[in-house]
């Protein structure tokens, strides 16, 4: 609470804040997914071969699949959020993640919680992501759980 701006300053900041909406964020996610695919596909191909991309037998083909498909992207995304406030997709569309109360960079704990909150947004038929389109501050369930918002960044 010590980092909270005074109420009058907070209201002034909210007046100029532009929250990033559903379609902007969906576009950023698409860009990020393409980048992740370009990086991970050759790694997975080198370990599992071409059959990996056509097989539907298991969700995770092995430990290398888990590391390359899930662990590395998660770590990379949280690190991008922590050091740049955004993933490459978000940077391209000029938005960043900030603390919902102070508009300062979120803590590492908030960012890890935000990433884990993607599960809460995805499980109920992606409702937590769709909610972004209807929320006043354009927050998905993962944003609400972690106390973050995504705003336009003109830096």
Image (cartoon, rainbow, N blue to C red):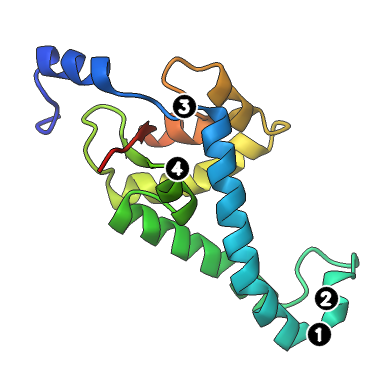
The front one of 86 and 94 is 94
Label 4 close to label 1 by CB (< 8 Å) = no
Q: CA distance from mark 4 to mark 2?
A: 33 Å
Secondary structure at numbered mark 1: loop
Q: In the rendered view, tell whether residue 56 sits above or below residue 118.
A: below
* Residue at 61% from the left image edge and 56% from the top image edge: 33
Name which residue lies at 52% across and 30% down.
141
Find numbered disc 3 in the image and state the secondary structure of the residue it sits on: loop
Q: Residue 79 placed where, x, y %?
A: 37, 61
Asked where in the image residue 17 lies, by quadrant, the reply is: top left
Identify the residue position indicated by label 2 in the image.
52
Mark number, residue 139:
3
61 with respect to 133 (left or right): right
> Which sits in the foreground, 128 or 145?
128
The answer for how far apart the CA atoms under marks 4 and 3 are is 17 Å
Q: To which residue does mark 4 refer? A: 93
Tell which circle, 1 or 3, labels the residue nearer the N-terminal end.
1
Relative to 9, say whether 65 is above or below. Answer: below
Q: Are marks 1 and 2 in contact (CB under 8 Å)?
A: yes
Label 4–label 2 contact, CB within 8 A = no
4 or 1: tag closer to the N-terminus: 1
Mark 4 to mark 1 CA distance (whole Å): 35 Å
Question: x, y (%) of residue 65?
Answer: 69, 74
Does 22 sit left or right of 87 as displayed? Answer: right
Write down the residue under mark 1.
49
Residue 136 rendering spot, x and y as whole percentages? 44, 15
Q: Is residue 70 left or right of residue 152?
A: right
């Amino acid at each position: 609470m010590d980092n909270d701006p005074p109420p009058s300053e907070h209201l002034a900041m909210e007046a100029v804040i532009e929250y990033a909406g559903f379609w902007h964020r969906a576009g950023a996610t698409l860009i990020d997914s393409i980048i992740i695919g370009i990086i991970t596909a050759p790694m997975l191909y080198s370990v599992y071969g071409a059959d990996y991309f056509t097989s539907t037998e298991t969700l995770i083909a092995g430990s290398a699949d888990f590391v390359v498909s899930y662990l590395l992207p998660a770590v990379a995304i949280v690190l991008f959020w922590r050091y740049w406030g955004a993933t490459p997709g978000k940077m391209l569309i000029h938005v960043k993640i900030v603390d919902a109360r102070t508009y300062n960079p979120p803590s590492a704990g908030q960012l890890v919680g935000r990433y884990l909150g993607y599960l809460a947004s995805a499980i109920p038929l992606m409702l937590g992501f769709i909610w972004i389109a209807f929320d006043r501050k354009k927050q998905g369930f993962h944003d609400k759980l972690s106390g973050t918002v995504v705003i336009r960044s003109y830096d």
